[in-house]
Structures are given as structure tokens and as C-alpha cells.
Image (cartoon, rainbow, N blue to C red):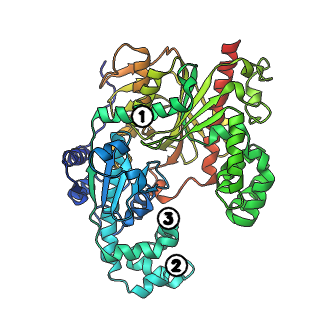
């Protein structure tokens, strides 16, 4: 079948990608400076000032959030699939180095304490993410280097939001608005002065090396990831499962209820330690939106447990969850994608979030069906891009029966606002160039009852892109004109794996593909974290804040209601 959308590509972006992969074929490290011209020439929507002498604060912040803090000291970035792969190239053992991570990207990395940063990658999507981030950072670093050398050391040392005059003077010297420098200060925190001093001292000249990038290497890394799960919970291969790609907090919070048993402690903690959260709690109380109160405690639990006061509860939480059949399986010796296995028969109805119960129906609201079920939920921390295909394919190969597949993740919206929820039934995948048509088993009504501030849009069209930097205004204009309003990275690769789960061949290329009448349940839901058609409204210009939790839990509740209703029906 012929596709109905034009090929979604740009000559400048294609040139950039060809340049990246031709350079990475080298057995030696290559310099990022070889990519700067191609990077700037693609006119990325995330790096609009790449060719300007003025700093692009949004692109700088975006890159810094997706690279470990040690990047200011690293010179060489090495990418590989596993520790054994690094050892084969005479590097490491890298897991004896300091383990480091980025704030806005889950990727296991290790720093040797000098100038080498080793990163585990799960697919080529990691390359499409790491290399543009390094290139953007290097371009912006060197802009700041030139500007900082026009600033006296005293101005830099005194620059602090509390010292308005010096802060304003530094912003002016760096060709930034005050609020832009304030965003950079927020990201760097206590390292603000030190980091700018490092930038002022030297130009940036990153080197990057890919140890091995064959499909076979990615398959081996995925096999290692799966074997770790099987060793921790052998029954996962023998019992029917509902597969969910989401995060590692929302499902467990809803099904365990642990946070709701610590309400008094959490409120006491935020009253003493976090004025911003205290103000948000007071707003919840004033508004009377009691349905969001549970979300608030779920959100603040992690912050409380990471504090000195709450640290003592960490072991108790793990035990509490395990008693209810919730097992966490961190990844080991390969890419950083945590898994959770939830044994439905061991859940305690008394601590499950009460917002699920009214939607089950009279035949199921006593939860007695849970005692009879043999089903599991396998939830994984959503992967980046094409890794989704590798992971779901491996899971399908090694499990006896999949009852449902549910994908929840972040997206950029061309017609919505941050905090909205998008439910697509058409996905164009840039990897396979397929247009997937499918019956999404969720509608706006399944989510809207728990969404207090955003809008739910169903019957939408989504595009699964290669990478966040690999988009420009021309491409997004084509997307929008074709009616595609949802931009994300995982749905297409997941649907390619879904195709192979019920068809006797590998997924096709460049076709319209029907995924109707699947032998299992399917749902894809995205919550909006970026609005690229609104200037500055991307993840480089600010996070979702606490209110980003609202759509996350609305979607999680919808998925869990669907699973519980299906399981009640299956058990009979």
C-alpha cells in the first residue's frame, strides 16, 4: 500500500545524520567540531540561535539537562552497549568508575574522574540524542567562552539572583535577558559560578567514540536486560502479562497506596522544608479539588524519601510493595531501563487508590477476581526511541501470552498546551516510514474525569520522530498541514513490534499498515510536555512542575481501570 503522507525528511537533517554516522564508523574518537556546521545548518527547532553570536539559553539548558554534571570536566564521550563491550575495547571496567546520570534523561554513564565519560546505549536513538546534545552544548559553550572573557572576574564572582545589579550586568555581558540567566542559574545551582569559570577558562572540544553499533550488539544488550528480569522473577515467562511502558512511580503509587499512609509525615516535611510545595497544598485545599490530593502525596513521596528525615522509610516502602506483589527490577550491566513486575493476585484492595473502584462495575467492585487471577503487569520505564522495538520484541519472544499493550509517554503538541493528554489512532513512524492505523482502546472520556486542568484530545494523528533536535520549522509545518499534531519518539517503534506479534513476517517499510483486530488490547496515550509552536515552550525553558503530575496520574488510572476490567471479565 502507498503511504498517504509525504516523506517527512529534510535535506539538512539527512546531511547531519549522514555526517554523524559516517564519522562514528571510525575506530578512533572523532571531534564534535566536525559536526558543528551540519548541526547549525539543519535549523533545529530546539536550537534556533545555533548560527547566531548570541547564546541560545533554551538549547543550552536542554542539553545540560540531558548530560551528566561531570560533562564540564569530560573531554571524551564513549558509547557502548554493555560493560563487556567496553572491556573488549580495553576500556574499564567502567562500572568501577563513578556512576553519573543526567537529570532529564535516563542513561547509565560512568565518569573516570579525569576526562572520560562512558555511556550505555540501547539503540541508535541514543546516538541521535547524545551527539546533538554534545554538539549543541559545544556551540553554546564556545559562545559563552568568548563573551565571558569580556567580563571581569569580580562580576562573575558576585553574580547571583540576590545581587540584582551584578546579575543584571552579567546577563547583559552574555547577551541574555535576566530571566534567561536565571534559568541557567536554576539548572546549575551551586555550581553556577564554578561552571561559568570553567567555560571562561577553556574552549570546548568534545571527542566522541562509538565502540560498536551493529544490530547484533543491541540485541545482545537487550537479551542481557531480559535475562536479568527472568532471574529476578522466573514466572514472568510462564504467566499471562499486561505490558505497560510508562514510568516507575505512578502505577506502584496507585496500586500500593504507600504514600497515602504517610500523609501527616509528608505534610509536616513540606511545611518545614519546601515552601513551594506547601503553597501548592494550600491551593489544593482552597480549591476543593480533593481528587488531586492523592496525586500530590504520590508526587511528594519521592522527595520526602530522599530527605534525611524520610530516608528511614525507604526499606519499609520496598517491603510494603513486595507484600502486595510489586517487585522492582533495576537493570544491571547494560542500559538503564528499570522494570516492575506486579502480581495482581497479591494486591491489597484495601490500599489500592479508590478512584479505580467505581469504574469496575458491580460484578467486580469487591475485587474478589484478584484472588483467582494468574496475570502479571510488566511495567518498564519508557525507553528512548527505537529501543522500544527491541524491548517489546524481546518480551514477546519470551512470554507465554500478552493480554494487553499500553504505552504512556511524553509528547510535543502542535495544537495543545502543556499538561494536555493526546490519544492517537494514527501514527507515522520515521524509522520504518510506515503509517500505522489502529484501534486505540481509550477515548477522551476514559481520562477526562481525573484531569483537573488539561484537555484530552482523542482521534489524533501522531509522528514518532528520530530525535528531539532532529526537527525544524519546515518539517513541523508539513506535519501540521497533514493533520499530525502529536510528536513523540516511541509509539512507532512499539507498533512495529506489535505488527510482528500477530503477522508472520517482519514489519514492512514505507506502507500504510493496518493494526486492526489485534488478538490483545492496545492503548497509546501521551501527555504534553512541549509546545514547539509557542516560542520558548520546550523542556529547555522549564519543566512540567507539580502540575505535570496531573496528566500522568490521569492516564495511569485509565490504564489500570482498563486492565482491572479486562481481568475481571477474563476470570469471569
Mark 2 and mark 1 residues within 8 Å of each other at the beta carbon: no
Mark 3 is surrounded, within 10 Å at the Cα level, by few (under 14), some (14 to 19) or many (20 or more) other residues, namely some
Pick the residue in front: 548 or 123: 123
Label placed on residue 187: 3
Q: Secondary structure at mark 3?
A: helix
* Alpha carbons under labels 3 and 1: distance apart: 34 Å
Query: Looking at the image, is mark 3 or mark 1 nearer the viewer?
Result: 1
x, y percent for residue 178: 48, 73
**Which residue is labeled 1 in the image?**
224
Residue at image location 71% in from the left, 33% down from the top: 324
Pick the residue in front: 141 or 550: 141
Question: Which callout, 2 or 1, points at the residue further toward the start of the chain?
Answer: 2
x, y percent for residue 389: 40, 30
Pick the residue in front: 513 or 467: 467
Q: In which quadrant is the N terminus drawn?
A: top left
Question: Which callout, 2 or 3, points at the residue further toward the start of the chain?
Answer: 2
- Left or right, 58 with respect to 273, comes to left
* Alpha carbons under labels 2 and 3: distance apart: 13 Å
The quarter of the picture where residue 556 lies is top right
The quarter of the picture where residue 445 lies is top right
Q: Secondary structure at mark 2?
A: loop
Amino acid at each position: 500500500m502507498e503511504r498517504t503522507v509525504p516523506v517527512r525528511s529534510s535535506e539538512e537533517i539527512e546531511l547531519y545524520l549522514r555526517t554523524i554516522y559516517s564519522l562514528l564508523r571510525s575506530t578512533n574518537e572523532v571531534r564534535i567540531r566536525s559536526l558543528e556546521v551540519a548541526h547549525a545548518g539543519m535549523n533545529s527547532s530546539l536550537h534556533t540561535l545555533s548560527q547566531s553570536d548570541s547564546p541560545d539559553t533554551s538549547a543550552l539548558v536542554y542539553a545540560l539537562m540531558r548530560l551528566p554534571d561531570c560533562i564540564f570536566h569530560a573531554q571524551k564521550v564513549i558509547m557502548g552497549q554493555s560493560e563487556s563491550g567496553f572491556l573488549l575495547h580495553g576500556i574499564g571496567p567502567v562500572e568501577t568508575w563513578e556512576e553519573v546520570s543526567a537529570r532529564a534523561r535516563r542513561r547509565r554513564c560512568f565518569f573516570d574522574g579525569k576526562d572520560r565519560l562512558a555511556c550505555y546505549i540501547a539503540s541508535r536513538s541514543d546516538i541521535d540524542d547524545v551527539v546533538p546534545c554534545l554538539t549543541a552544548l559545544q556551540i553554546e559553550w564556545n559562545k559563552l567562552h568568548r563573551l565571558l572573557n569580556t567580563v571581569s572576574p569580580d562580576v562573575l564572582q558576585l553574580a547571583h539572583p540576590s545581587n540584582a545589579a551584578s546579575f543584571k550586568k552579567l546577563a547583559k555581558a552574555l547577551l541574555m535577558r535576566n530571566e534567561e540567566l536565571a534559568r541557567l542559574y536554576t539548572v546549575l545551582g551551586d555550581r553556577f559560578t564554578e561552571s561559568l569559570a570553567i567555560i571562561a577558562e577553556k574552549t570546548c572540544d568534545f571527542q566522541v567514540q562509538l565502540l560498536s553499533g551493529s544490530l547484533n550488539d543491541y540485541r545482545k544488550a537487550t537479551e542481557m536486560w531480559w535475562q536479568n528480569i527472568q532471574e529476578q522473577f522466573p514466572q514472568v515467562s510462564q504467566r499471562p502479562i499486561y505490558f505497560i511502558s510508562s514510568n516507575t512511580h505512578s502505577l506502584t503509587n496507585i496500586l500500593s497506596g504507600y504514600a497515602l499512609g504517610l500523609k501527616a509525615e509528608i505534610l509536616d516535611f513540606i511545611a518545614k522544608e519546601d515552601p513551594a510545595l506547601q503553597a501548592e497544598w494550600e491551593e489544593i485545599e482552597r480549591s476543593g479539588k480533593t481528587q488531586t490530593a492523592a496525586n500530590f502525596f504520590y508526587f511528594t513521596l519521592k522527595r520526602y524519601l530522599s530527605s534525611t528525615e524520610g530516608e528511614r522509610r525507604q526499606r519499609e516502602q520496598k517491603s510494603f510493595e513486595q507484600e502486595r506483589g510489586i517487585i522492582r527490577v533495576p537493570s544491571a550491566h547494560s542500559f538503564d531501563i528499570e522494570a516492575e513486575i506486579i502480581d495482581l493476585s497479591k494486591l491489597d484492595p484495601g490500599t489500592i487508590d479508590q478512584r479505580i473502584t467505581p469504574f469496575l462495575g458491580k460484578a467486580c467492585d469487591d475485587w474478589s477476581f484478584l484472588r483467582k487471577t494468574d496475570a502479571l503487569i510488566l511495567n518498564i520505564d519508557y525507553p528512548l526511541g527505537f529501543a522500544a522495538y527491541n524491548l517489546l520484541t524481546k518480551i514477546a519472544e519470551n512470554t507465554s501470552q500478552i493480554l494487553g499493550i499500553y504505552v504512556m509517554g511524553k509528547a510535543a503538541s502542535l495544537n495543545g498546551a502543556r499538561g494536555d493528554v493526546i490519544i492517537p489512532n494514527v501514527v507515522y513512524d520515521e524509522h520504518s516510514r510506515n503509517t500505522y492505523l489502529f484501534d486505540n482502546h481509550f477515548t477522551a472520556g476514559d481520562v477526562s474525569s481525573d484531569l483537573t486542568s488539561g484537555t484530552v484530545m482523542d482521534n489524533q494523528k501522531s509522528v514518532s520522530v528520530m530525535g528531539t533536535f532532529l526537527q525544524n520549522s519546515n518539517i513541523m509545518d508539513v506535519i501540521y498541514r497533514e493533520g499530525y499534531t502529536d510528536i513523540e519518539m516511541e509509539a512507532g517503534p512499539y507498533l512495529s513490534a506489535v505488527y510482528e506479534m500477530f503477522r508472520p513476517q517482519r514489519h514492512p517499510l514505507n506502507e500504510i499498515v493496518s493494526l486492526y483486530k489485534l488478538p490483545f488490547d492496545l492503548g497509546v496515550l501521551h501527555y504534553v510536555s512541549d509546545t514547539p509552536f509557542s516560542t520558548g515552550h520546550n523542556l529547555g525553558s522549564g519543566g512540567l512542575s507539580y502540575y505535570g503530575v496531573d496528566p500522568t496520574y490521569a492516564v495511569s488510572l485509565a490504564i489500570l481501570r482498563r486492565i482491572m476490567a479486562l481481568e475481571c471479565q477474563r476470570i469471569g
